[in-house]
Amino acid sequence: MESINPYIPLQWQTVTEDKAAQPEGTAFADTLKKALYKVNSLQIKADEAATALATGQAEDVHQVVIALEEAMLAMQLTMQVRNKILEAYQEISRMQI
């Protein structure tokens, strides 16, 4: 499984699309990787829109606000999913076998 390098932005890392070459059972990892890539691209888009607004290059303030809200909502959703995954892991680790 290809790991995500925290020191290289996700936009520069490749997300593999070839399912035939990957072992079975990596679909969740690929789905998670694609979702994180999408959140990262929304964050980059919002940052670029905010920079354009600050430099006076943005023509439509509404589009900037929409981009910022999309990025914020995507990050909040990502954090909630992360919290649920951690809660599930902790619950499983507390189970007695």
Image: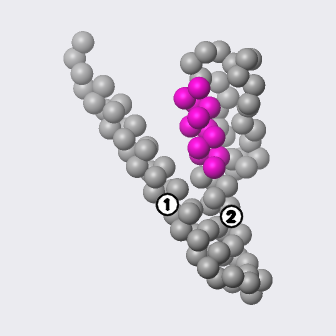
Question: Residue at position x 69%, y 19% from top?
Answer: 22
Considering the numbered disc 2 on the image, is that residue within a helix, a strand or a loop? helix
Q: Amino acid at mark 1?
A: Leu
Q: Residues within 10 Å of mark 2 (few under 14, many from 20)?
A: some
For the residue labelled by badge 1, is the local secondary structure a helix, a strand or a loop? helix
Q: For residue 28, say whether it is visible.
A: yes
Q: Quadrant of residue 1?
A: top right
Disc 2 marks which residue? Answer: 45
Q: Position of residue 60 (x, y in %)?
A: 69, 82
Residue behind mark 1: 73
| Residue 76 location, quadrant | bottom left
Mark 1 surroundings within 10 Å by alpha-carbon count, few (fewer than 14), some (14 through 19), many (20 or more):
few
Upstream in the sequence, badge 2 or badge 1? Answer: 2
User: Which residue ends up furthest to the left in the rendered image?
Assistant: 96
Q: Which residues are magenta?
A: 27-38
Residue placed most toward the observer, 37 or 97: 37
Which residue is drawn at the image coordinates 73% and 17% (left, top)? 20
Looking at numbered disc 2 in the image, what kind of residue is underneath it? Lys
Determine which of the numbered discs, if any, sits on residue 30 in the image: none
Residue occupying image coordinates x 62% and y 60%: 43
